[in-house]
Image (cartoon, grey):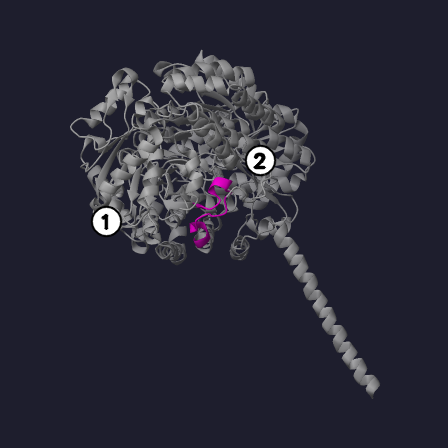
Amino acid sequence: MNTPLDSCVIDRLRATFRSGVTFPEQFRMTQLQNLLSLVEENEQLIQDALHKDLHKPKFESVLSEIQITLNDLYFAMENLRTWMQPEYNIGKNLATRMDDCFIRREPLGVVLIIGAWNYPLHLILLPLVAAIAAGNCAILKPSEICQATEQLLAELIPKYLSQDCYAVLCGGAEDTKSLLKNKFDHIFYTGSQVVARSILLAAAPHLTPVTLELGGKSPCFIYGHIDIQKAAKRLCWSKFFNTGQSCVAPDYVLCTAQTRDALLPALRETLRTFYGPDPGASLDIGRIVTPRHWRRLMDMLEKSKGKVVIGGESREEDRYIAPTVLVDVQESDALMQEEIFGPILPILTIESLEEGIDYINRQEKPLALYVFSDETSVVTTVLNNTSSGGFCGNDGIVHMALPGLPFGGVGASGMGSYHGRWGFETFSHRRGCMNRSWLLERVNVLRYPPYSDYNLGWLRWATTFKKNSWGGCSVM
Amino acid sequence: MEKQAVQRAREAFLAGRPRPLEFRVQQLKSLQRMITDRQGEIATALKQDINRSQYDTPLFELIGLENEISLAVSKLAQWAAPRPVERNLLTISDQAYIQPEPLGVVLIIGAWNYPWALTLQPLVGAIAAGNAAVVKPSELSEYSASLLKALLPRYLDQELYPVVCGGVSETQELLRQRFDHVFYTGNSTVGKLVMEAAARHLTPVTLELGGKSPCYIDKDVDLRVACRRITWGKFVNCGQTCIAPDYILCEPSIQNRVVEGIRQTLLEFYGPDPKSSPDYSRIINQRHFNRLMTLLEGYTATVGGQSDSSQRYIAPTVVKDVPPQARLMQEEIFGPLLPIVTVSDIDDAIHFINEREKPLALYVFSSNKKVIRRMLAETTSGGVTVNDVIMHYTLNSLPFGGVGQSGTGRYHGKHTFDQFSHHRACLVKSLGLEEVHMVRYPPQNHQKVRRVRLAMRTPLVDFSKGTYIWAVTASIVALGLLVALTVILILAAGVSCTCL
């Protein structure tokens, strides 16, 4: 892939966008329908590619890649007409009572969507669904780390979607850098903070708005009265799903020593139920994506001063790391300096909820925050005294599966959001429109020079916000 | 010094001071008092900065600001409350809502053309949303900047809302600090620098920039009224308004009537000598005056054209038949020069507009619904007013912001509150219904996969009160009808029995 070729593709998409062909509802619906067919008709190929890239178990591929994409498509198709409608139900003041005031949602243009490797299908297709629904053209840049999925997307997208509107460009870091020299109308990036900075810097000269879905260390409180068996199940599920390589996986646990002592046997039992006595032989656990990532995790584990109480086994040849739990981990530990993004769960002991909250607030704002507790006061205290992209009480990850909730970060964990209607809004411009009546020019006269106190008085009255205005019309 | 101000603001924020809604309301009310008490001083500062007429001050700076404050005070509890979202069958017994939260310490960089409105309106939203805010007024409107620096600490919490004054180097120093949001109003050149500086800290930005806002006049229109409205919007604040109609597009057949309409209106507004009218402003400084005079070079004004460098006065000026490649058409004018570019028809006008960068505002004057519809559907812009100019800015339920080169993000009314908030997605589940959740745990098999797919496909349901009441009422009515039918049948059977 080289720059002149990219520019050709971008120019072609831009010309298509200018022609207005992506604007009508019918066009968008057809493309969404085609994308639906792409996923439905190629489920097996998708599962195979994901297994090749990440050793992803079929269950995870279906749940977290295929079904989540299909759901988002159904949701978009069902609601597209509503989303596209101009919004009329907005308040007016006396001076604009006779006017037509509404908000239009308009497409932005040619957008760039950069995917990630941990959920290589849905992290690129969900933004695409939103971009299509909002009437844009889109360039997809899938992660080069998942080569099988990347190639599959490069092959299937042009087959199912309009080639003049949507294109897949493949390549590595250098290619992405030169791609970013072009102007886009929005850039949607999922990945790491380091790369995010360079994307923002590349976007600044073009004044391109950016959505960043990043990550961070998502803390998980287990505190107060709680059914430890059930909590352990949900914690294990969300932590070790996709072998811990989820941006919203609970990164580490905060609990009292007492809770920890009750938690460990529950975790052991759950892991045995999930994966059997030897997780390395289970079909239901994946692998680390590349040798480099495996090495990074092993380094962290080796440098850690915590005590391994569950797991710890690993195999370099197939990039396997057993679900591993460590205790006696301190704030300064190697495992606590960066997002883990692997099947390693440190448990930090705290003496009080406040101590845990203080700890969290000393770190960067995470993408997700979890609390397992039966006590409402615990949940409320954590919610009110922390910030995070999203929050889930008594479970992990699943908050991102509800399309009514916006999915995105805050601070170092990202900016902007998507899923469902939020994606549509992200890829749209909200244009405020006022259609003034020709009547009442006599009232308009109040605003023209030569100015006077008298006119000003009336104008103030007509335009001032009234606390409990009954919407009546008395001056006209 | 800048670093310390930011540091203190952050400490005050982390201590939780702006968290309670009562505190925010009290600060907003105090801001309101400042505007009411000090209106005279504000008007004087504006006169010194830009020769702003005493009436333009309340009209363009203060009324809007007061409305924003009243709205925020009145609606804050509602805006800050959790916003429930639709749930599906899997989350039927859970709480799912969006909680707006403060971002932290935000930076607001104001502009010089409406130094009070454009600096304080964002501040209203920032305070309402529970943030600390560092306010950096524009140094070009120096009297307003000094006055704001003197006044704000007397009315608002000094640590949470410091005012930092200064020029380019002070602004650059500020931008080196880390903020949780940067709100900038100004031009796109500096906008790019602001975005670049914010990028280093992964800080989101709102950029309210500008551009050339086109004004299309259809031949099928009441020219007298149209010209009056356009003249008002163009020459108020001496054309130094980000949403002033920058240039006119019209067919050659009506060009002369347009010119006449404007000429006549100017006479009504400012009299034969606008220089002596108390209602006509001046150019902000010598640099901008020179810039504007350069734009005019080589063109003969059809209306106006006079200037006086010592007063930074430029008469309201109209230039006919301006070619698209003229200097007047290459950059945002931001002054009292109004070029008219002729186009052959609506198609030509739409094409002309779309060839250029997306503007902050777009205006179309027409009595023909089809023309209006086409203009709206086939172009884009930050905002639109049809059959008038500027007015979409005044309705705070409309989002105000640009797109493309004219900016990113939006504000006014609730939109400001939302812009300065983080919308945290919250799902609070119970550990009950575990049987339902069992399907997702390993070890996995075909049946589990199938069940999970089915469970995930349930549609979203609206659990709002209205739907609930409807459902209950409908059920009661249906039950009632069923009972009535049963009774009737029984009675009928009973009657036939006795008849025997």
Residue B75: assigned label? 2
- Tell me the tag on residue A374: none
Specify few, some or many for label 1: CA neighbours under 10 Å numbering under 14, 14-19, or 20 or more: some
Q: Quadrant of residue B212?
A: top left
Disc 2 residue type?
Lys
- Which quadrant is home to the N terminus of chain B? top left
- How far apart marks 1 and 2 lie (CA) works out to 46 Å
Callout 2: few (<14), some (14-19), or many (20+) C-alpha neighbours within 10 Å?
some
Q: Tag 1, which secondary structure? A: loop
Report the residue at 46% width, 46% height from top: A98
- Residue A122 in view of the camera: no
Per the image, the residue denoted by label 1 is B345
Numbered disc 2: what chain?
A: B
Q: Which of B77 and A94 is in front in this view?
A: A94
Please tell me which of labels 1 and 2 falls first in the chain: 2
* Residue A85 lies in the magenta stretch: yes
Chain for disc number 1: B
B160 over B268 or under it: above or below: above
Asked whether the residues under the numbered discs 1 and 2 touch, taking CB atoms below 8 Å apart as contact, a structural biologist would say no
